[in-house]
Amino acid sequence: MGYKIWFVKHLLKEKLLLIILITFLVIFIGTVSITPLFIGDIFEELVKETGQVTKYLLSNGFHTIQINSSSFKAILITALFIGVAGIIRAAADFIQSYVDEVLAHKVTKNVTAEFYNDLLEKSQEFHDRVRIGDVMARATYDTRQMNIFIAPGIKFLFEASFTLIFSVSLMLWISPKLTLLLAAALPFYIIAIYDYNRKLRPISKAQMEQNGLLNSRLQESITGIRVIRGFVKEKEEINQFDIETDKLRDINTKRGIISARYYAVAITVLIIALSFLWGSFEVTAGNLALDELITYVFLMMTLMMPTWQVGWTLTQFQIGMAAAKRIFEMKEREEYVPESSSPIDWAGSQGTILFKDVSFSYNGESTRKKALNNINLEVPGGSTVAIIGNPGSGKSTLMKLLMRLYDPSDGTININGTNIKEMALSNLREHIGVIEQEVFLFSKSIRDNIAFGKPDATQEEIEHFAELAQAHEFIMGFENGYDTVVGERGVTLSGGQKQRIAIARALLIDPSILILDDASSAIDAETERKIQTAIANVLKNRTTFIITHRLATIKNADLIMVLRNGLLIDSGKHDELILRNIDYRRLFERFSELPPMQIKEEK
Amino acid sequence: MMRRTTGTTEAYDRKYSDIVLLSRFFKYLTPYVLMLVGIVIGILASAVVTIFPPTMVQNAFDALDAGEGWIAVLPFALWYLLLSLFLWVIQVVLGIMVTIVTQKVIKQIQIETYISLQEHDMMFFDTNATGRIMSRVTNDSQELADMLNIVTQFISNLFMLVTVLVWMFIVNWRLTFITLAMAPFVFVVAFLFRRITRLTTGDWRAAIGEVNASFQESVSGISVAKAFGREAKSKEEFTVINHATFYYAKKRAFAVMGVWPLMDGISVIGVFGITLYGSALIFGNLASPSVILLFLLLLNRFLYPLVRVASQFSTIQSGFAAMERIFSIVDAKKEITNPENPITREIEGTIALEQVHHQYVPGEQVLKDINLDIKTGESIAVVGHTGAGKTTIASLLMRFYDIYKGSIKIDGVDLREYDMYNLRSQIGLVSQDVFLFSGTVLDNIRYGKLDATIDEVNEVINVVAAQEFIDALPDGLNTELGERGKGLSAGQRQMISFARTLLTDPKILILDEATAAVDAYTEWKIQEALDKLLANRTSIVIAHRLTTIKNSDRIIVLDQGQIVEEGDHDSLIEKGGLYSELYETYFKHQSAEWISEISDVFAD
Ligand SMILES: Nc1ncnc2c1ncn2[C@@H]1O[C@H](COP(=O)(O)OP(=O)(O)OP(=O)(O)O)[C@@H](O)[C@H]1O
Ligand SMILES: Nc1ncnc2c1ncn2[C@@H]1O[C@H](COP(=O)(O)OP(=O)(O)OP(=O)(O)O)[C@@H](O)[C@H]1O
Ligand SMILES: [Mg+2]
Ligand SMILES: [Mg+2]
């Protein structure tokens, strides 16, 4: 499916609105086109009756005039027609303009929602790659451009074509000969429009892209404001932004100039003059009545508007379509985590986990080193597993594979004997609670943040888990308690406060498997210990993964995995590892007296 | 002016009078006076020229009516053509000029907003969503600049109105009065719609900002949403916000789309009147039939501008709403600014905190009566429970926030008297929250010192023990990172951020949990290398891993915003206070005793 079809489908979804729109457009155009006819009639009447004065009196503020009664009646009736037509026109105009706007906003709304929903479904790889600013540009600016194309674009398009049809058929009726002129001009119109289009297309695309770039820059400099301040890079940032806005300005100016030079309008002017001339010739020759010529010229003039409208709509069409393409392309990138068609339900309460030949590298086939290489391990249900390793050794990656944020490139992961790929994503994830290494809080109230995974949690539950995470106390220290709204990503909280809220958030969903990815790096030992003691009960019978650099926590685990640069180099208990694993010993070396190594240092 | 009750306005939003808005808007235009003069001349010219083509038609008709042949019509047709083409050319030139000025103004507004963002207080960013701020810089500035287009049309229509009116008076003053009779109605309608448009537009734009913010946050927090299987709920929430925008858009459309047809309806009365009264005049021999033709032709050129002027009046309101939104953000109050005569000098590195009190939210004391003297070259460690206020001290030294009470002095001079940019550039902060920019690893390390040589870069890379992993990256130092440094592990990012600060060679170095995400062995390696670097500069180390701080000259223990203990490691241990408690816990972790204790709990 191409983006054009996608766009049209979105339009067609609003059938009712479209039907109303077109109906009232036809009424509107009809009344507009008929008016010149009435004017011609009046004129005919006037020419006929000029100078014949009768007793009919019309009084007004200035003076009294006598008018021929029958003529006046005819004129009065025609004028009434004009009036009624005008009122119908105004009403129809309102309805069609309004409905068009509603249609446009409805489509925008649907497109935005579809885009949003789609983004949420997209794989983590996708999200690793895109720039939020660019996504935002698509979600806002681009949808707005589509919106403008629909209203007033589509209205203009219909208006222009209906006006053309009405006016031209009336013109044909009055004088087919004169209308030939229009036919002769057709090729010129086509050339003008084709030429215009050709110039406009690349610039519209460039404009959208530059806009996306600008947005990314803006977004990054707002989110990174602390770093910018800290390094006093305001001037550089401003300069960069200046360059980007300059580029956008140049592109926009170029586009503006192209559309100002749209010359189809000049062709219409030319035709009006020519038909006027030719018409006079016909009148002189007696082939055409004078009032017919008048009507004809009026009709010609109504063509000015469509010519202009076509130009405008074309411009917006180019932009709207470029926008639709951008949204569609991002949306259509087939980057979803594949879901099993007949998912197997989560079985058992604890998680016995089996990593079998698990390998993974980011960005698929790229030159990147494997982040994980051939991991094999069985984790008994209910055990506490510590994962240690140098930065970048693949600890977080392994956990992300477990949650299916990514799928391993080789090997399988089984939980309670079921390959996780065969479970429904939602089912898998609702059984796993995670405290991410870099805690992300939403700019909502603390309550909403804790209840994130279980929106219907009661206040007691929330408080209970906050207490376990040692967060209750500091939350109550805030003036608004649980209703305190935190800043974006939780900026208004201290590092440890964020982590504790994240811990409460993960505990609240009552997971079978809990992952603590460096969850206490910003928490002091005392508080950490309190948390550990408090949650020990909760963690009983659950498989817990703890990634940490705190030696004590490591020592205490049932099973320790030692990773180095993507390889699982050893696993076992503290007492075993301290004797045989050099990586493991290194961690403790400085702090305690260690027993002698039992196996030779491997190279 | 009426206050809106929708919850979508920001704390910094304010109301401006129309005069203020306009005068500020025109300030943006002043650099383009020449262009503007050109535009006005163009408008004038087209307004004057615009009445002639219909006159030509009228003359031609008179000629034909008098029985003259088409030859007589020829000159009129030619003139019609020439004048119309001339009009078109003027329109093209006008269009180009308006585009150029408009784009320049948009750019100007955007850059000014951006500059103001760079100057805003940190508090501003703490409390305002990125999506909403962005919406103002990009969308609202666009809307504002569209004003120029509308104003041009407005003026053009106004001129046209006047010229056509004059011409009509000349041709037939009686008919002109009839035509004018509908003007009051038009203006009453315009005035009514003015208020409605402005309000509904403001609501609509605010709702768009809301959608932006929600969208933006959902996308940035996507991994959390996924991890918690919250997609469905997020979609639901977004639907509500998205629908609100639709609702306000509809409301606005009703107002904006309503003006024009309503006025069109009124104009019908005009046509009706002209036709009727005009016929009467003709019958009364007070006008010739061609006059009424001319009037009907002119009527389009009179009514159209009249109605336009009136309805544009309400469109301009929509621009006013955008202006208000932009100016509000530009004018948002800035507390932290440079003093009048800022001090710029190389600092030594003595720090003195005197009775420092701080609060982010009124009434919530975060720091209480902090007194602290740090000598040049001294190495200070700050420890304490989470949320004690350690990071706050770092932020205050950087002057990200101004203290509530007391004073912070560097080399004996109050922080607020320094040029803050100069000061910040001499203090290096490795913050707890790591933020890397998209771009290469090298770009990121060099961020604070763009002209650093590759040797200097390699040196700091070695200090933070990052050489190994950088070498393993696909393109080494030139590996492209995604936003926030995506493509590296958290520990790797932290090392890069550390290196970035070290490269600037600051006089005062603040390490806020700078190695919290790296393993003990790597940390130890970093520390070995760091010791040399720290030797002759003032440093403040904040850490929860107490192994990190053992070597410090002095340890400050913070608790609930107060300094509770101060001294070196040995003396503090001896004292048996909070520090020894923290220390005990930290190391007790490793004792066999604690393991069995916690195993007991597990075994329950
Ligand atoms: N920008 C902010 N706006 C409002 N309150 C804040 C802000 N930053 C910090 N706070 C509050 O100030 C207090 C101290 O926070 P601070 O970040 O200084 O703690 P910390 O000692 O660094 O803790 P941690 O060890 O957890 O990082 C906390 O209660 C926190 O919620
Ligand atoms: N989104 C990503 N795209 C590409 N490569 C990545 C991405 N995230 C991590 N990597 C790379 O994969 C490897 C493993 O990263 P991972 O985050 O699993 O490390 P980690 O063991 O958790 O380290 P840390 O202790 O620093 O958190 C690293 O070399 C890292 O550079
Ligand atoms: Mg990690
Ligand atoms: Mg902190």
Image (cartoon, helix red, strand yellow):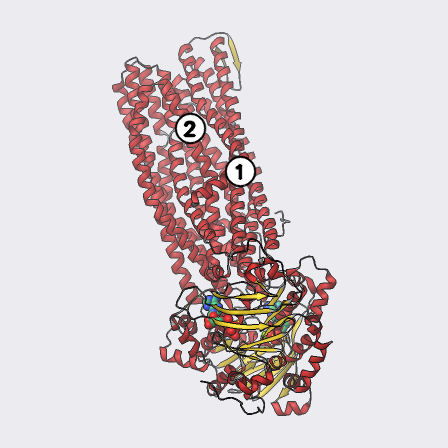
Asked if residue B515 can be seen in this view, the reply is yes
Q: Quadrant of the C terminus of chain B?
A: bottom right
Task: Name the residue nearer the viewer: B186 or A238.
Answer: A238
Q: Identify the amino acid type marked 1.
A: Glu
Position of residue B270 measured from the top left corner of the image (x, y, whole percent): 50, 25
Whether residue A255 sits left or right of residue B523 in the image: it is left
Q: Identify the amino acid type marked 2.
A: Thr
Label 1 CB less than 8 angstroms from ligand 2: no
On residue A277, the disc is: none
Q: Relative to residue B465, is residue A288 depicted above or below?
A: above
Residue at the front extreme, as displayed:
A417
| Residue displayed at 43% across by 52% down | B106
Task: Specify few, some or many for label 1: CA neighbours under 10 Å numbering under 14, 14-19, or 20 or more.
Answer: some
Asked if residue B25 can be seen in this view, the reply is no
Question: Mark 1 = which residue?
Answer: A14
On residue A163, the disc is: 2
Position of residue A202 measured from the top left corner of the image (x, y, whole percent): 35, 48
Task: Specify few, some or many for label 2: CA neighbours under 10 Å numbering under 14, 14-19, or 20 or more.
Answer: many
Task: Name the residue nearer the viewer: B551 or B406.
Answer: B551
Position of residue A379 measured from the top left corner of the image (x, y, whole percent): 59, 72
Marks 1,2: beta carbons within 8 A: no
| Residue displayed at 38% across by 24% down | A168
Ligand 4 image position (quadrant): bottom right
Whether residue B546 sits left or right of residue A323 in the image: it is right
Residues flagged by tags 1 and 2 on a common chain: yes
Measure the C-alpha gap from mark 1 to mark 2: 24 Å
- The chain carrying label 1 is A
Whether residue A304 sits left or right of residue B487 in the image: it is left
Q: Across the whole image, how many numbered discs are drawn on residues?
A: 2
Q: Nearer the viewer, mark 1 or mark 2?
A: 1
Mark 2: secondary structure: helix
Task: Name the residue nearer the viewer: B327 or A422.
Answer: A422
